[in-house]
Image (cartoon, helix red, strand yellow):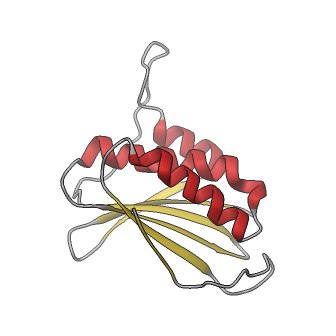
Amino acid sequence: MTMTSTDVPRPDVRDRRERRITMFVWPETQCVRSVRRAVQAILDHWEIAHVTDDAELLTTELLTNAIRHTGGEQPLRVTIAADQRGLSIGVRDRSASAPRPHRPTACEESGRGLLLIERIAGSWTYRFHPDGTKTVSCRLPL
């Protein structure tokens, strides 16, 4: 996992500047745990640890969806950004397909990722980029 940061100092939550960290991870399920630990450390460093549980879960769901539905040999880009409006979490992959929520039956063991993201974050969105990649993201209020 490779991390880059556009803002190194420990900013106050009320600070108007955006703090942003980008991690590049291989699309492998064993990378999810490392990303969760990184999210925990980042939010602690930014002094917004009160959203850690939700942020870890949202990041896990976004990342797992990208791994499951895109595969491939290109790294995924996970971006965590915070400003006074909230915490944004986005995963960028090489898929050209739009994500579609699945309404699983009670017996199905998977397929609830986007529904869970919507329930916790309130909404999610996606956008396609000119280079053929796509970002799926959500925002948590601080």
Please say if 18 is above or below 51.
below
Task: Determine the image quadrant of residue 103.
Answer: top left
Residue farthest to the top?
Answer: 107
Residue 86: in sight, yes or no?
yes
Pick the front one: 68 or 39: 39
Q: Position of residue 102 (x, y in %)?
A: 40, 34
Q: Residue at x 31, y 64 (%)?
A: 134
Q: Position of residue 1 (x, y in %)?
A: 39, 61
Pick the front one: 140 or 100: 140
Residue 122: in sight, yes or no?
no
Q: Residue at x 79, y 80 (%)?
A: 12
Q: Residue at x 52, y 73 (%)?
A: 21
Q: Residue at x 67, y 87 (%)?
A: 17
Q: As drawn, is 17 to the left or to the right of 79?
A: right
Please say if 15 is above or below 125.
below
How many circles with numbers are drawn on the protein? 0
Q: Position of residue 106 (x, y in %)?
A: 49, 15
Q: As drawn, is 46 to the left or to the right of 66?
A: right
Q: Position of residue 140 (x, y in %)?
A: 66, 59
Please say if 22 is above or below 92.
below
Quadrant (top left, top right, bottom left, bottom right) of the C terminus? bottom right
Q: As drawn, is 131 to the left or to the right of 34?
A: left
